[in-house]
Amino acid sequence: MENILACVDGSSQTQNILEASAWVANKLDAPLVLLHALEKTADTERDLSGTIGFSSREHLLSALTELDEKRASLALENGQLMLNAAQSYASDKVATITTLQRHGDFVDTLESIQSTTRLFVMGKQGTHHPRNDVLGSNVESAARALSQPILVISNEFKKPESFMVAYDGRETAVAALERIAQSPLLKDIPCHLVMVKRNKSDEKMTLDTAKAKLDGLGFDVEAHLIKGDSIHSALLNYQQTNNIGLIAMGAYAHSKVRQFFVGSNTTKMLTDCEVPVIILR
């Protein structure tokens, strides 16, 4: 059975991630796995041997290596304690819950287990990014690398009473709509299908077609073609005005090179949004 995988690192977002993960696991009747990825630190000998250089300082290199090993051992122990606490917190919320600790690059770790994962849950920032207006680098990297959905949490989690699909008719948006249509996660929640007007002749038809698809599958949908000079600002204004509790959207329709020059609405939405965002590929 595919799992819901919650990424926990002891940051201020951990409790919110656990609440969101429990909600998803129960909605999808899926087991919950709590993951702590312990990223490798730089190797002391590789980094310092050239600097130390002299045989008379070999004892210092040895001491530094031992210190790194001790730090790694303490980090491992601390991570396991954190996982145990997280499991204890979530144990009365989810029927089946296990923990997993892995060494290595965070995104590589997620890629290695995504075949058994139905949806990832992670915080907008990790322990190194305490500010809520900053997007953690791992989130963007994961959104580009993973094919499974990612639920990104930014603040206190509340069960959404409505959700918004940010739709533009492009390939990533169509794929996102298909994922939503096939999943029971949002089926019983009112849906706002929202498209920012870009003065194209077929926009209304594109939006109506998408609405009809969700209508036919039993979703409660209202569709809106809205105006705005900035796509992500217009979408966030709509979300805030209508008190929408969750946003679903496709990720990164353009290449990294193009985004360097014109920006990315996905990154801007994730950075500025204060409600959970589901990224769908």
Image (cartoon, grey):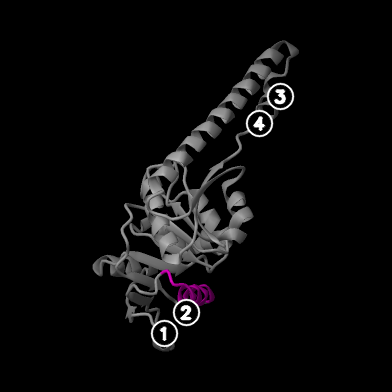
Q: Which of 44 and 211 lies nearest the eye of the viewer?
A: 211
Q: Earlier in the sequence, mark 4 or mark 3?
A: 4
Q: Is residue 66 left or right of residue 24?
A: right
Q: Earlier in the sequence, mark 1 or mark 4?
A: 4
Per the image, the residue denoted by label 1 is 203
**Structural crowding at the residue carrying mark 4, measured as other residues with C-alpha within 10 Å and reported as few (<14), some (14–19) or many (≥20):** few
**Structural crowding at the residue carrying mark 2, measured as other residues with C-alpha within 10 Å and reported as few (<14), some (14–19) or many (≥20):** some
Tell me the amino acid under the disc marked 1: Glu
Q: Quadrant of residue 248?
A: bottom left
Residue 210, placed above or below residue 280: below
| Prevalent SS, magenta region | helix
Q: Is residue 65 among what the camera can see?
A: yes
Where residue 164 sits: x, y (%)? 36, 71
Per the image, the residue denoted by label 4 is 43
Where residue 193 sits: x, y (%)? 37, 77
Residue 115, placed above or below residue 214: above
Q: CA distance from mark 4 to mark 3?
A: 13 Å
Tell me the amino acid under the disc marked 4: Asp
Per the image, the residue denoted by label 2 is 169
The dot on residue 50 is 3
Q: Is residue 1 left or right of residue 242?
A: right
